Amino acid sequence: MEGGNAVCFQPPRKVERTWRLILLGPPGVGKGTQADLLGNALGACPLSTGDVFRAARSHPAPAGSAMARAQAAMERGALVSDDTVIALVRERSRCLHCSGGFMLDGFPRTTRQARAIDDLLAAEGLRLDAVISYELPTEEIIGRISGRRVCPQCKSTFHVASRPPKTEGVCDKCGGRLEQRADDRPEAVRVRLEAYNADTIPLIEHYRALKLLVPIQAVGRPEDIFARTLDALAALVLPS
Ligand code: AMP
């Protein structure tokens, strides 16, 4: 497996408690934004499989390699093969031992991946605290994704209607030229939503049965969704 760096980038720090979390939710629901906010607040190390594949795109993958196939699947909006994604997460198993815990964003996405992470955590002697499932109506998802623009340089995210940059097409932070992600194009979004409905929705029941599921309404501003998430996590640690 090529691309990405198999090290945890979160420096060790003193944290109140360790959170080991999975973030579930349809594409465009804002998991990445919540992962950043939660990472700062909780000290947990975010690991986004989508970010690893996007980062690897700047290094041309050898034709026929697992990474080349992964990148082609990603461009279409299709899921990367379970074997490839599971190998990628196993390579980063050090992140699972980060002192503040971890947040898996975009993994698992299939029943096989869920079994793989269950096995990996058991082998590492770790237990999940919660699976946060962000929920949003489909029309709102499509609106969010189709207007999303990202800065390829500093990774800042904007939205043409709800969070426009000061100058159209230009990143407020670094002046980079904003782009639409290839997999945010309408035809790829359709494929991503189909994959979510077919492969990822069953995981909601899997984690509900394990009493780990924490559903969060993802409507409103990122800071409101973040506040709802923190309240839900706080409720988990209150003595009952
Ligand atoms: P994301 O940013 O999480 O929406 O991921 C972007 C793309 O990366 C997805 O549409 C897939 O092509 C690929 N990808 C990321 N994570 C996974 C995963 N766990 N399983 C399969 N494909 C994935």
Image: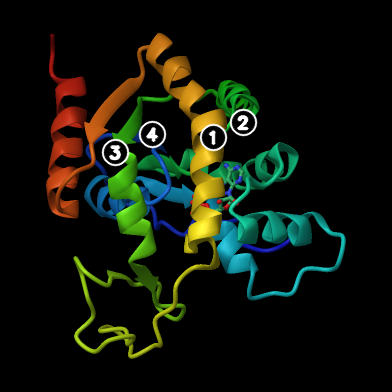
Apparent side of residue 220 relative to residue 195 in the rendered image (left or right): left
Kindly tell me whether residue 43 is visible in this rendering: no
Q: Judge: label 2 CB < 8 Å from ligand 1.
A: yes
> Residue 219: x percent and y percent?
19, 44
Question: Residue 85 falls in which quadrant of the image?
Answer: top right
Rounded to the nearest whole Å, what is the CA distance between mark 4 and mark 2? Answer: 15 Å
Rounded to the nearest whole Å, what is the CA distance between mark 3 and mark 1? Answer: 21 Å
Badge number at residue 137? 3
Rounded to the nearest whole Å, what is the CA distance between mark 4 and mark 3? Answer: 23 Å
Identify which amino acid the numbered label 2 is placed on.
Gln
Q: Furthest-right residue in view? A: 64
Rounded to the nearest whole Å, what is the CA distance between mark 4 and mark 1? Answer: 11 Å
In primary-sequence order, the first of circles 1 and 2 is 1
Of residues 229 and 64, the one nearer the viewer is 64
In primary-sequence order, the first of circles 3 and 1 is 1
Placement of 121 over or under 51, stated as above or below: above
Classify mark 4: helix, strand or loop. Answer: strand
Identify which amino acid the numbered label 1 is placed on.
Pro
Identify the residue at image location x=63%, y=48%.
Answer: 78
Badge number at residue 67? none
Identify which amino acid the numbered label 4 is placed on.
Leu
Badge number at residue 21? 4
Apparent side of residue 165 relative to residue 127 in the rendered image (left or right): left
In primary-sequence order, the first of circles 4 and 3 is 4
Q: How crowded is mark 1: few (under 14 residues within 10 Å), some or many (20 or more)?
A: many
Placement of 191 over or under 157, stated as above or below: above
Rounded to the nearest whole Å, what is the CA distance between mark 3 and mark 2? Answer: 25 Å
Q: Which of marks 4 and 2 is in front?
A: 2
